[in-house]
Image: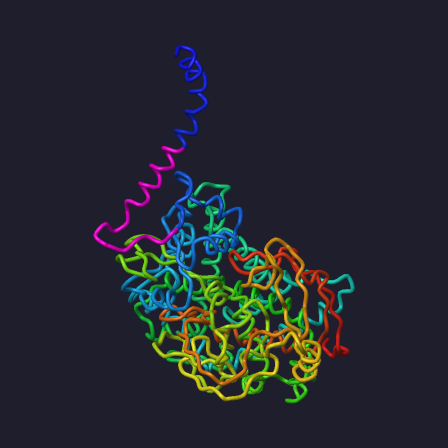
């Protein structure tokens, strides 16, 4: 007996640490779950609250977007976690996301990490209710259809200049960095009126880059830390905006009631609308924050989208050839032909390419909200005051009516026509082509020159896309030959550990382009209904991206000018991607460009 007691005393010190850790973990879980609504009979979603105090933030920091993928595989489309200091519910899936987006102001409100709120302050994305409507109204005039035409020619000139420069560099370029610089120059001139290659534009590029990399930083204002640096950069940008606002005030004072001409910048349009009382209840400070956000988020997202476009087009050469053929068809292959909005709208195949890129690699992965009251999603409780993160990227990926969601295939948008433009939420449904004998159907939303990202109502035809047929095991070879002949489509197929969202492996696995593979079974004209929230690259509802038409315009111009001016080769066609904050290749996309024509520019 005494010997047994001695053994127990000897091993007791070794048991204390794990016992204390277990107790601490249980106390942490109990503490975090105490904030749930005890009056509700609903259960919390599955998931883990992680380690004491830090939750699962360390996992999120190490794994990035893979954190969400792993948790989704483990827990499903709605799960709980504790990241960035907050108890959080992650939501994905069209119906689930729709409830979050349509519940803005009633069920949820905007809620971003503290460092983001401090930096962006009185911007549009972080406000809510009437305040959000007022600030959004202050900038939306810069992107109405009447303004878009004036942006085309100047955007095209920027892209032509950059592509010609890339072709002249025998050593190649880091394409992703070059595109980011290009998109900032376009935004700086189109939105603020700052000529490129000036001292002001170069300084603004540096300041915005500093803010961008510190949006999700430790929320402590200590010199040397990211937040302090971002705030200093923000104040320097505000000083420049003050000068620009004063210039507009002086110009208006000399010509009271003057309206902007067709060549006015977005900033001039916004300020003139503000001066003339169109948004008299918006303060000067709010106006500066709105412009800061418009330029910061606008050029970052567009640069990401264009970089991913260059990557996907490189790996699907038949898509490039189809775009080039369409340019020839509409007599736009000559670089000397001036682009207009009307000419761009005729490029229907290009529009399907844009839509497909935004589906498979949306520039924004999702958004943050805060629950205003306890409510239900997918049978689970969303407790009041918890953070809700809805996922655009995962929602696109898991949509059941999208066959082979991991494949970049613009042809999937060919079979449905006639939808109307809708930037806001609606209860209408989308009708998709499908197989009467299969749960796999081909979603079709496209064909209109004014492409919509939250389609309102569409009709189908009975035809099926030749590119989306089932390859039988008995006639696979002949089927592949037929597909190659009739549709000439190369499609990207993911590897075993690849993200279906991006089509590339987060662990850097090699991805190959395979010609002629089936995307799904489209053997008949059965009709499948799905909500319009299955495709939301720019969000939806009252917070739908105000500058989405400008972003799509820039993407169209970028592709047209790049295809008609050059051919290019990526040194690494299968780069490792990161998805936070926006999709980007970790190697910067080193590339070599070759001119299709002898440049006539001086």
| Nearer to me, 241 or 448 | 448
Tell me the magenta residue range: 22-46
Q: Residue at x 40, y 29 (%)?
A: 19
The quadrant of the rendering that contains the C terminus is bottom right
| Residue 106 appears in the figure | yes
Q: Quadrant of residue 4?
A: top left
- Using residue 484 as the reference point, say whether residue 464 is left or right of it: left
Q: By what rule are the colours in the image chosen? A: rainbow
Q: Position of residue 24 (x, y in %)?
A: 37, 34
Q: Residue at x 31, y 45 (%)?
A: 33
| Nearer to me, 131 or 490 | 490
Q: Residue at x 63, y 76 (%)?
A: 472
On screen, 226 above or below 101?
A: above
Q: Position of residue 13 (x, y in %)?
A: 43, 20
The quadrant of the rendering that contains the N terminus is top left
Q: Quadrant of residue 357?
A: bottom right
How many numbered marks appear? 0
| The furthest residue to the left | 39
- Using residue 196 as the reference point, say whether residue 14 is left or right of it: left
């Amino acid at each position: 007996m005494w010997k047994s007691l001695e053994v127990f005393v000897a091993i007791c010190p070794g048991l204390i640490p794990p016992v204390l850790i277990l107790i601490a973990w249980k106390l942490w879980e109990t503490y975090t779950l105490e904030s749930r609504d005890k009056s509700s009979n609903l259960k919390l979603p599955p998931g883990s609250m992680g380690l004491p105090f830090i939750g699962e933030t360390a996992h999120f920091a190490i794994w990035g977007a893979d954190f969400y993928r792993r948790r989704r595989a483990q827990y499903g489309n709605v799960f709980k976690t504790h990241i960035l200091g907050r108890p959080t519910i992650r939501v994905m899936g069209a119906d689930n996301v729709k409830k979050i987006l349509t519940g803005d102001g009633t069920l949820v409100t905007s809620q971003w990490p503290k460092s983001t709120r401090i930096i962006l302050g009185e911007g549009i994305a972080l406000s809510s209710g009437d305040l959000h409507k007022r600030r959004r109204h202050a900038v939306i005039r810069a992107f109405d259809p009447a303004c878009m035409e004036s942006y085309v020619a100047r955007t095209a000139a920027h892209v032509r200049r950059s592509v010609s420069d890339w072709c002249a560099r025998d050593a190649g370029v880091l394409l992703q960095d070059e595109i980011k610089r290009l998109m900032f120059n376009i935004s700086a001139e189109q939105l603020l009126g700052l000529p490129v290659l000036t001292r002001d534009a170069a300084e603004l590029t540096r300041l915005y880059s500093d803010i961008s990399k510190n949006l999700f930083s430790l929320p402590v204002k200590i010199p040397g830390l990211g937040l302090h640096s971002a705030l200093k950069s923000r104040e320097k940008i505000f000083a420049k905006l003050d000068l620009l606002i004063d210039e507009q005030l002086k110009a208006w004072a000399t010509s009271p009631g003057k309206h902007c001409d067709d060549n006015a910048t977005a900033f001039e349009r916004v300020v003139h609308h503000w001066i003339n009382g169109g948004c008299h209840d918006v303060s000067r400070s709010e106006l500066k924050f709105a412009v800061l956000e418009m330029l910061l988020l606008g050029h970052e997202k567009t640069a990401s989208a264009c970089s991913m476009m260059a990557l996907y087009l490189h790996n699907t050469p038949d898509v490039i050839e189809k775009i080039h053929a369409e340019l020839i068809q509409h007599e736009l292959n000559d670089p000397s032909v001036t682009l207009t909005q009307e000419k761009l709208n005729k490029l229907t195949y290009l529009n399907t390419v844009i839509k497909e890129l935004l589906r498979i690699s949306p520039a924004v992965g999702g958004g943050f909200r805060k629950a205003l009251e306890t409510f239900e999603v997918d049978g689970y409780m969303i407790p009041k005051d918890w953070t809700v993160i809805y996922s655009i990227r995962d929602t696109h990926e898991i949509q059941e009516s999208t066959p082979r969601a991991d494949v970049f295939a613009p042809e999937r948008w060919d079979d449905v026509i006639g939808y109307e433009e809708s930037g806001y939420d609606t209860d209408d449904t989308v009708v998709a082509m499908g197989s009467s004998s299969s749960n796999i159907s081909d979603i079709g939303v496209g064909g209109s020159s004014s492409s919509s990202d939250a389609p309102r109502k569409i009709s189908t035809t009975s035809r099926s896309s030749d590119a989306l047929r089932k390859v039988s095991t008995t006639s696979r070879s002949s089927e592949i030959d037929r597909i190659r002949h009739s549709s000439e489509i190369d499609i990207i197929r993911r590897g075993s550990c690849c993200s279906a969202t991006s089509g590339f492996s987060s662990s850097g696995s090699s991805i190959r382009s395979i010609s002629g593979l089936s995307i799904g079974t489209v053997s008949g004209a059965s009709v499948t209904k799905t909500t319009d929230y299955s495709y939301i690259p720019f969000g939806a509802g009252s917070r739908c991206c105000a500058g989405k038409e400008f972003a799509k315009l820039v993407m169209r111009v970028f592709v047209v000018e790049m295809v008609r001016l050059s051919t290019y080769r990526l040194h690494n066609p299968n780069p490792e991607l990161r998805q936070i904050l926006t999709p980007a290749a970790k190697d910067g996309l080193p590339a070599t460009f070759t001119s299709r024509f002898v440049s006539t520019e001086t």
